[in-house]
Amino acid sequence: MAVPVRVATYNLHGLRDDVAALARVIAGLRADVLCVQEALRFGRWRARRAALAARAGLAVATHGRVGGVAVLTGPRVRVLHAEHHALRAFRGLERRALAVAVVEPVRHQGGGGGGDAAVRSESGGARLAVGSFHLDLDQAARTYHAAEITAIMEDVAARHGASVVLGGDVNEQDHQPAWRHLAARLADCHAEAPAGGGPTFPAHGPHLRIDAVFAARDTPVVSCAVPATGSDAVRASDHFPVVAELRVGH
């Protein structure tokens, strides 16, 4: 049976802003899967990523440092596989990466004897391969990495019998080459099912839609919007998050 899965993307601005507000915004997204960019990469970064996720009721599914990208997951999905890819290096530019988690929606069933509760698939075994990415400010690097990312995601999805979902900071708008490449292969969820605001940057006076969720065309998009534009969201990061509600399974 088809079940709803909320996939979000959020550039955390390196936790350089109001971290308490950031945690509240993340919790308010009610995301089952959250793709993050500009996650911490230095100074106890693993523990601090985990602590932020826990404050929002999530867990870190991917554990790579390169590129500052990660996938966080909530209790309504089970992580079946995770991997982290450093993308092609460009001289003089920041190293970019792709974090990937293969997930399956589940229902927790009560257990006895103090053990973990049993889980069962809610979607008939349907899976999502969810990737978090952050493209560069350089046009040539963005275009190259967009193609590299889709190739990696298609390979992961084929290996695990999953449908591709990508969430990230594209660092360009929908008329530009990297975005057009992604949207030619996947559905731009906000264009598919807009359910509210679209601009994500800058948080003080947003007028650019540079963050997005893309989904395989066999995955129905129920809605997609920027849900958090209040005072917490303005204090939390220089970007607003995007949330897409998808239907997974049949």
Image (cartoon, helix red, strand yellow):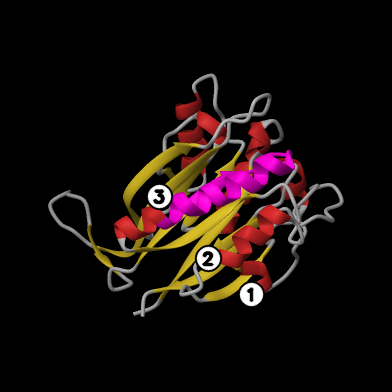
Which quarter of the picture shows residue 195? bottom right
Q: Amino acid at mark 2?
A: Ala
C-alpha gap between disc 3 and disc 1: 24 Å
Give the image location of residue 84, x and y in percent.
43, 39
- In this rendering, the answer to whether 8 lies above or below 139 is below
**Mark 1 falls on what kind of element?**
helix
- In this rendering, the answer to whether 96 lies above or below 8 is above
Q: Which residues are magenta?
A: 131-154
Give the image location of residue 138, x and y in percent.
73, 38
**Mark 2 falls on what kind of element?**
strand
Residue with the mark numbered 1: 192
Quadrant of image for the C terminus? bottom left
Residue with the mark numbered 3: 101
- In this rendering, the answer to whether 68 lies above or below 234 is above
As drawn, the label of residue 215 is 2
Specify whether residue 22 is in view.
yes
As drawn, the label of residue 112 is none
- In this rendering, the answer to whether 140 lies above or below 209 is above
Give the image location of residue 24, x and y in percent.
61, 47
| Residue for point 84% across, 47% down | 204
